[in-house]
Amino acid sequence: MAGEPILVARYCALVIIGEATCPNILMSVGEVELVQLEAVAAAIGAPVIDLVDSCDFLIDDSLRARIAEKNRRTLILCGGWLEGAVTQVALSSLLEGYDVYVCADQVVTEDPGREHVFLERIRFCNGHIVTTRQIILEFLSQEKDPAARAPLEALLNSGAAG
């Protein structure tokens, strides 16, 4: 529908990606930052799909079932190496027909000079590149209930989404 925001809370799930080859990857992203994104998910009632312990980041039957049970068609990806699992999960999810948003300020890259290569590849395959701030603002634009807006506004005002 024209004018409707693209990120719609009732369709979203947050996917937290780890790396089998680097178990401390989430520390590199910053636990505080991921906690903030988890707080956004909680504020909008979005389920969290934790892939931290996954070994295979292509959509297989097990992962397909985990996502399907959440009954969501939009995936917000964070955590993990951009040039590894994040790109693989994004591309395989796009092939499965999901709307995919990569939260660019919530992933890690080994080579910041080449970050644009991976983000452009995801974008070229119809994925979306966003920031935590953009996500919060988009959800706020849809929410009219002051009680539901309060946690999102608090996150925005805390500077966490800066």
Image: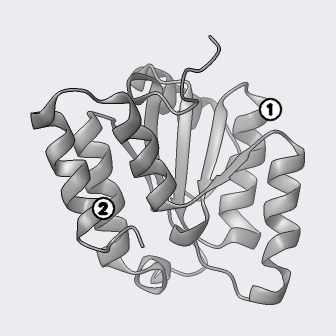
Q: Compared with residue 143, is residue 152 higher up or lower down, i.e. above or below?
A: below
The quadrant in which residue 31 appears is bottom left
Describe the colour scheme in one phrase: one colour
Q: Height in image: 159 above or below 135?
A: below
In-front residue for pair 51/144: 144
Question: Alpha carbon of mark 2 to alpha carbon of mark 1: how far?
Answer: 33 Å
Where is 149 relative to 104, above or below?
above
Question: What mark, if any, has residue 21 been given in the picture?
Answer: none
Mark 1, Cα crowd under 10 Å, few <14 / some 14-19 / many 20+, is few
Q: Quadrant of residue 148?
A: top left
- The residue at the point 9 percent across, 35 percent down is 147
Q: Amino acid at mark 2?
A: Leu
Q: Position of residue 73 (x, y in %)?
A: 55, 24
Q: Residue at x 62, y 54 (%)?
A: 102
Residue identified by numbered label 2: 156
Q: Position of residue 17 (x, y in %)?
A: 52, 60
Q: Which residue is mark 1?
A: 95
**Residue depicted at x 62% and y 10%:** 1
- At 33% from the left and 35% from the top, the residue drawn is 46
The outermost residue toward the top is: 1
